[in-house]
Amino acid sequence: MWDERYSTDEYAYGKSPNGFLEQNYRAIPKGRVLSLAEGEGRNAVFLAKQGYSVTAVDSSRVGLAKAENLARENGVSIEVVHADLAGYDLGENRWDGIVSIFCPLPSAQRKTLHRKVVAALKPGGVFLVEAYTPEQLKHGTGGGNSADTMTTRESLLAELQGLEFRHLQELEREVVEGVYHTGLGAVVQAIALKQN
């Protein structure tokens, strides 16, 4: 599905970074950042332009090729990794920041991934996430049609034990990101810190 979605010249979700990331990236310590389900590179390239060393992981080779092109267009370099998040090894105490922007995984897979995120962050590292909540199904402005791939404030609290939340909020906001995320969206946003 994702290779097909990314196979046009247009960038499915645009070339600009996610708004929540753009407003809050300074919460992430300078250093190595892992961007989960990065797609066509808009968030990874933005972070690289801010001076981070960025690794972008995605299951779509087509998306990652476009991410590399976007990086070249912007005069930065990013590392791309073609992998399914279900089997991807995030490492331990490895990343200064991990970013998850609209990463729609089945809940069982998301729970496993979030455990890996907690282990993979360095002490003092930050996890920044924006995801659709099940309320998004009422809007139909992106995120698919399965509540199981959506996230709530409560699920993040349960799945990210070991992190201290600096920001955790469910809200509705205008999401304008390419042709697939446009309109009022129901989202959960979080910034969580791994204690030293």
Image (tube, rainbow, N blue to C red):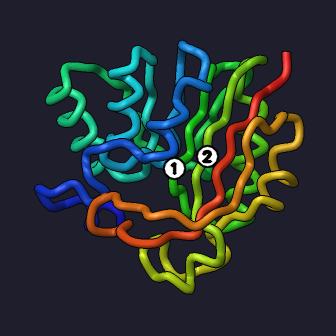
Please state if 163 lies on the left or on the right of 44 as rendered. Answer: right
Number of callouts: 2
Return the residue nearer the eye: 47 or 34.
47
- For this orientation, the residue located farthest to the bottom is 138
Please state if 143 lies on the left or on the right of 46 as rendered. Answer: right
| Residue 126 falls in image quadrant | top right
Marks 1/2 in contact by CB < 8 Å: the verdict is yes
Which kind of residue does numbered mark 1 sit on? Answer: Ile
- Residue 105 in view of the camera: no
Q: Residue at (34%, 25%) from the top-left corner?
A: 78
Q: Residue at (39%, 39%) from the top-left corner?
A: 43
Q: Which residue is mark 1?
A: 101
**Which numbered disc, 1 or 2, marks the residue that appears first in the sequence?**
1
Secondary structure at badge 1 equals strand
Characterize the local packing of mark 1: few (<14), some (14-19) or many (20 or more) Cα atoms within 10 angstroms. many
Secondary structure at badge 2 equals strand
